[in-house]
């Protein structure tokens, strides 16, 4: 049956119909009073979602644009940047820093692991002349499904004095992220994830400490310049022509997030993630991130059973049930498959997905007790 496709990848994520209908309207002028009124609400509601008193900038770009907007406004050539990486997206911070001529020190853990706060504490204690200027981190590492303890890591970075720059692309909305309370200096995210709108917008918020470093940046980005965006936010506008329709859609999505409440939205993701993990274990599947407390609440990475390939699982899910799950990335390609439970996802979606996965694995010859996954999931959801 056509038109029944369900995305269970870590982005783009499903978009609510009311958001789609807003996006489908005729574009309006980006300098009109009508659009300014929308932006005013959007900027205010973004502060609520990002749990900050500081402005949140909107860029017409994908999430990587916001990552560039962070580092390109902070780094001068030769700056020492420590990049703590859990995988692909942590490595992206290092690549961006390198593109600005930074002296990059990369620390990468094994796939599925997270940064041990004591290792970071020790490394920063060794930096007695305070040469490390910036530490980049990923909250929820989409390529593995592991999530750092950002609160603890950022407090260690604050003690040292470096700036913490955090990728919250798949954590904002899904997991608690509190920049003001936790001392995150720069936080970025993207629209096609927890925000429940299509790809095309990215977000950044920075605190006063970050602004001091920005002021020392000799060649800040032009398109992503913070000062231009700050001035625009103050005037309920944007520096350039934004993706107007996506912002109109975002306005609706943010209202939905406010109605649900950010804490409830975070709790929904945690409940789904834990229920899914136990359902998968119940059908004899191995998870890449072993310990629940290190798991991202938006992505779960699963090892295929012995003798069954990731492409076969993905194509059967797609062809038989129209459910799209993601492959692994880079060296994890065909080694894991990933299920996203990010954004506009309800219990029904999860029950359907686990049922479809059971049917897929049954067809492909995996040995497990048929029905045990759905049964476990339902019990967990009613927990
Ligand atoms: C954790 C994380 N960071 C950064 C990005 C990059 O975002 P984009 O692909 O929108 O540029 C992604 C995208 O999946 C991501 O999951």
Image: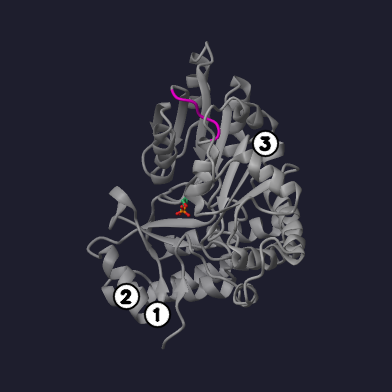
Which tag is nearer the camera, tag 3 or tag 1? 3
For the rendered model, the colour scheme is: one colour
Q: CA distance from mark 1 to mark 2?
A: 7 Å
**Looking at the image, which residue sits at the far left?**
307
Q: Are marks 3 and 1 in contact (CB under 8 Å)?
A: no
Q: Going by the image, does 185 lie left or right of 315? A: right
Q: Which residues are magenta?
A: 73-77
> Is ligand 1 less than 8 Å from the beta carbon at label 2?
no
Q: Is any atom of residue 86 visible in this view?
A: no
> Is ligand 1 less than 8 Å from the beta carbon at label 3?
no
Q: Residues within 10 Å of mark 2 (few under 14, many from 20)?
A: many
Mark 1: secondary structure: helix
Query: Vertically, is 117 above or below 312?
Result: above
- Indicate which disc, 3 or 1, sits on the residue closer to the N terminus: 3
Residue identified by numbered label 3:
182
Q: Nearer the viewer, residue 295 or 45?
A: 45
Residue identified by numbered label 1:
321
- Indicate which disc, 1 or 2, sits on the residue closer to the N terminus: 2
Q: Is any atom of residue 15 visible in this view?
A: yes
Mark 3: secondary structure: helix
- Indicate which disc, 2 or 3, sits on the residue closer to the N terminus: 3
Q: Are marks 2 and 3 in contact (CB under 8 Å)?
A: no
Q: CA distance from mark 2 to mark 3?
A: 43 Å
In magenta stretch: residue 133: no
> Is ligand 1 less than 8 Å from the beta carbon at label 1?
no
Query: What residue sits 39% from the left and 43% below the top?
Result: 87
Q: Are marks 1 and 2 in contact (CB under 8 Å)?
A: yes
Mark 2: secondary structure: helix
Q: CA distance from mark 3 to mark 1?
A: 42 Å
In the figure, residue 159 lies in which quadrant? top right
Q: Position of residue 50 (x, y in %)?
A: 67, 49
Residue identified by numbered label 2:
316
């Amino acid at each position: 049956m056509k038109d029944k496709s369900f995305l269970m990848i870590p982005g783009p994520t499903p978009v609510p119909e009311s958001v789609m209908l807003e996006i489908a309207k005729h574009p309006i002028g980006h300098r009109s009073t009508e659009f300014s009124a929308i932006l005013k609400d959007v900027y205010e509601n973004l502060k609520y979602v990002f749990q900050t008193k500081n402005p949140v900038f909107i860029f017409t770009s994908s999430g990587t644009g916001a990552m560039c907007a962070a580092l390109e406004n902070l780094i001068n050539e030769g700056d020492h940047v420590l990049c703590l990486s859990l995988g692909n997206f942590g490595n992206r911070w290092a690549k961006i820093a390198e593109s600005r001529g930074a002296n990059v020190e990369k620390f990468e853990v094994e796939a599925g692991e997270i940064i041990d706060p004591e290792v970071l504490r020790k490394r920063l204690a060794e930096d007695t002349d305070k040469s490390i200027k910036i530490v980049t981190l990923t909250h929820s590492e989409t390529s593995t499904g592991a999530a750092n303890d950002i609160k603890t890591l950022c407090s260690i970075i604050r003690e040292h004095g470096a700036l913490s720059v955090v990728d919250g692309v798949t954590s904002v909305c899904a997991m608690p992220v509190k920049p003001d309370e936790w001392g995150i200096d720069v936080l970025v995210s993207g629209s096609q994830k927890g925000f429940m709108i299509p790809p095309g917008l990215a977000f950044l918020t920075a605190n006063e400490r970050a602004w001091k470093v920005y002021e020392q940046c000799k060649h800040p980005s032009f398109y992503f310049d913070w000062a231009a965006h700050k001035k625009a936010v103050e005037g309920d506008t944007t520096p350039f022509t934004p993706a107007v329709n996506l912002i109109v859609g975002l306005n609706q999505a943010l209202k939905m997030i406010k109605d649900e409440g950010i804490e409830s939205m975070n709790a929904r993701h945690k409940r789904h993630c834990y229920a899914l993990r136990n359902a998968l274990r119940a059908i004899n599947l191995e998870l890449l991130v072993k310990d629940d407390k290190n798991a991202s609440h938006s992505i779960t990475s699963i090892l295929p059973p012995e003798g069954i390939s990731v492409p076969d699982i993905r194509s059967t899910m797609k062809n038989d049930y129209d459910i799209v799950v993601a492959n692994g990335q880079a060296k994890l390609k065909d080694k894991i498959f990933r299920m996203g439970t990010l954004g506009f996802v309800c219990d029904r979606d999860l029950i359907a997905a686990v049922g479809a996965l059971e049917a897929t694995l049954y067809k492909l010859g995996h040995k497990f007790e048929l029905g045990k996954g759905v049964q476990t999931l339902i019990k967990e959801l009613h927990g």
